[in-house]
Image: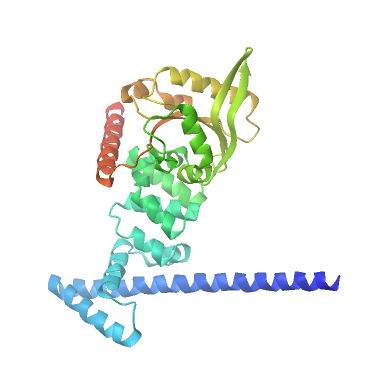
Amino acid sequence: MEEVKNNNITEQVKFLINQSKIKVANAVNTEVSWLYWQVGNRIKHEILQNQRAEYGKEIISSLSISLSLEYGRGWSKRQLHHCVRFAEVFSDSEIVYTLCSQLSWSHLRLIIPIDEPQKRDFYIEICKLEKWSVRVFQERIQSMLYERTTISKKPEVIIQSELELLRKEQKISPNLVFKDPYILDFLELQDTFSEKDLETSILAELQRFITDLGTDFAFLARQKRITVDHTDYYMDLLFYHRRLKCLIVVDLKIGNFEASFKGQMELYLRYLEKHEQIEGENSPIGLILCSGKNEEHIELMQLDKSNIRVAEYLTLLPSKELLKQKLQLAIEIAKNRIEINE
């Protein structure tokens, strides 16, 4: 009995020590990042006062030498350029200090090269929400997550509104959850595969699939059977999204989107609404994953009114340049359609 008590005390003390270490590490991280912003802000003002481009290079070079002699490594010209960029991108000191307490300097260094303010805000808020490591955060940026997320194809006023809602109230919209395309290169499928192969591979790599979907997705069932008028139907994959508070059906298709897919998904969603949805949950959402999309079909069928989304999946990761061109074209087309319909 005495031994059990001692073990409990030991574990409790260890917990207190570890919690204290975490708090100290977080406090140090906040102050280091805040220092970098202050240094960058001071250099920025010095350069602006002189108004000579060459002076900026001179002051950074001389400052780097002086600081490195005094404090050792960590004050290279590259680091000082990062500090200046940090101050240029974020000018409000109060916002900066809050940000420094939420994300590490390694996270912030990945954000500051991004030129578009809305894109920057998206990555900041989603990273805080998902609590990504630096490695995962870098992978998300490199995979062009923002451009693949539905929100990037919306008008600027909607992007700002939904990011503000996420920032202030931690409320996330479907536009911030769903993507197009989904990159499933980790499944390592052969050139020819069936819907069953795709489903089996996804289940085998479920953790990585959910990481790409988003960490709020919880897997519920594979090939969930429902019976309507004595006829059995099977949903490929069924998930629950914690923050959206709704069921999500994923239907896997080989080939391009077809009009018949809508009716099948509507049946699944209406069934879930009637038989599975519980009090306090939102209406279920359907995600049809196809290897290709017929854009005019999707536009004419007004799938969003039925709570249905369609996205492509890529089983091979294209070059970043090709993916960038493809996504930029998709964003332009989507925004042009919005302008025409207004």
Horizontal side of residue 9 vs 241, given as left or right: right
Residue in view at x 47 percent, y 55 percent: 132
Above-or-below relation of 70 to 333: below
Q: Which of the 4 quarters of the picture holds residue 272?
A: top right
Q: Which of 280 and 290 is in front in this view?
A: 290
The location of residue 77, given as percent across then percent down, is 25, 74
Horizontal side of residue 66 vs 183, given as left or right: left
Q: Nearer the viewer, residue 140 or 123?
A: 140
Horizontal side of residue 266 vs 336, given as left or right: right
Above-or-below relation of 107 to 199: below
Q: Nearer the viewer, residue 117 or 288?
A: 288
The location of residue 312, given as percent across then percent down, is 38, 33
Above-or-below relation of 268 to 74: above
Quadrant in which the C terminus is drawn? top left
Q: Which colour scheme is used?
A: rainbow
Quadrant in which the N terminus is drawn? bottom right
Disc tally is 0
The location of residue 112, given as percent across then percent down, is 32, 60
Residue in view at x 35 percent, y 84 percent: 71
Work out whether residue 83 can be spotted: yes
- Residue placed farthest to the right in the image? 1
